[in-house]
Amino acid sequence: MKMVLGPGKILGSFFTIAALIIAVTIVMRIQVSMRMQRANGELADDSNAGKAISYTIGHIGTSKGNTVNVKVRYRYNVQGKEYEGTILSLNGNSYGTYSEEKVKKIISDLSSSPQITVWYDPKHPEFSVIIEPSVRKGWLWLASLALLAFSSFKYLDRVVIKLQSKNKAIG
């Protein structure tokens, strides 16, 4: 039996490459999130620069979908040196519009106290986030792509061959 590069192998290869890219990203995020350490911080509310945390609804790049873009500034100390951060989470500062209420809750929770918890990378203390690092959703994407790759490799070529044989029998 000779191996044919059919649609199953092509799609399976695509999903496998995507899964590998996501796997590398997850591994890198896990490494960063595992070494992140806590520090006490505070929202950096200057009268000149406006609110320390706010949000707007807009677009990212050429996307037509709306996103909730969070703007945040906070200060924290690591070994006596002061740093300023602007990143909300490892996923960045943008959320889909369906989560506007979630963003409002995050802002409300962060604004309710003068002190906030900051998570920083001890190797690069200038890199920090204020939402505890988590990579749960990445595992779901990876599992989904791995399943699609396996299914494509295993079954799609069989389906195409059966359809071709039916078409030959009819035609």
Image (tube, helix red, strand yellow):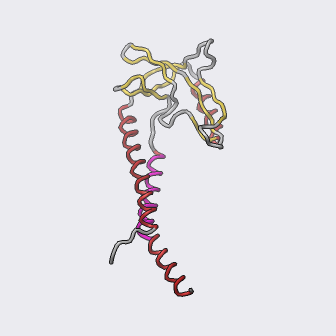
Q: Nearer the viewer, residue 6 or 39?
A: 6
Quadrant including the N terminus: bottom left
Q: Nearer the viewer, residue 119 or 155?
A: 155
Q: Which residues are magenta?
A: 137-155
Say whether residue 38 is left or right of residue 108: left
Q: Residue at x 62, y 40 (%)?
A: 99
Number of on-image labels: 0
Image coordinates of residue 75 in percent, x first then y, are: 49, 18
In magenta segment, residue 3 = no
Q: Residue at x 65, y 43 (%)?
A: 65
Q: Nearer the viewer, residue 26 or 66?
A: 66
In magenta segment, residue 144 = yes
Image coordinates of residue 44 in percent, x first then y, are: 55, 17
Q: Residue at x 63, y 37 (%)?
A: 59
Image coordinates of residue 13 in percent, x first then y, are: 41, 59
Image coordinates of residue 107 in percent, x first then y, are: 60, 29
* Image quadrant assignment for residue 112: top right
